[in-house]
């Protein structure tokens, strides 16, 4: 017989950043970003939305392979 199991809640990616907001979204003025900026994609950074290198310990602990989005201004 087929036994249906209750659906388990799916794990959340964001464990602690700005949990009081319905959606964490950030807007940047491109002119203010300088020549290079690294944006966190692992949701572990204490400087979110900027990368502070926390992805390295996350990857080491979990075997994951996440890293930042690095935006660079084209050299003229
Ligand atoms: Fe999150 Fe680097 S700290 S990508």
Image (tube, grey):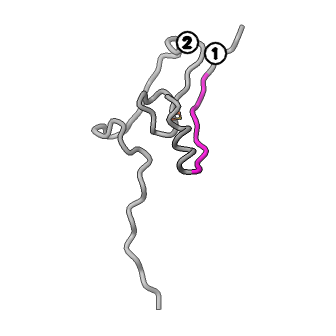
Up the image or down, 31 lies above or below 44; here it is: above
Magenta-colored segment: predominant secondary structure = loop
Is 76 on the left-hand or right-hand side of 7? right
Residue 56 lies in quadrant: top right
The stretch of residues the image draws in magenta is 63-71
Q: Residue furthest right?
A: 76
Is residue 60 found inside the magenta-colored segment of the image? Answer: no
What residue is rendered at 68% in x and 15% in y? Answer: 74
Q: CA distance from mark 2 to mark 1?
A: 8 Å
Is 53 on the left-hand or right-hand side of 7? right
Q: Which residue is mark 1?
A: 73
Q: Which residue is mark 2?
A: 34
Residue 48 is marked as none
Up the image or down, 2 lies above or below 73; here it is: below
Is residue 66 found inside the magenta-colored segment of the image? Answer: yes
Q: Residue furthest bottom?
A: 1
């Amino acid at each position: 017989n087929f036994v249906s199991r209750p659906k388990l809640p799916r794990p959340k990616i964001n464990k602690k950043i700005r949990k009081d907001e319905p959606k964490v979204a950030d807007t940047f003025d491109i002119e203010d970003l300088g020549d290079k900026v690294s944006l966190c994609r692992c949701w572990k950074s204490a400087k979110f939305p900027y990368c502070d290198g926390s992805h390295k310990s996350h990857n080491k602990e979990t075997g994951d392979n996440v890293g930042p989005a690095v935006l660079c201004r084209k050299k003229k």
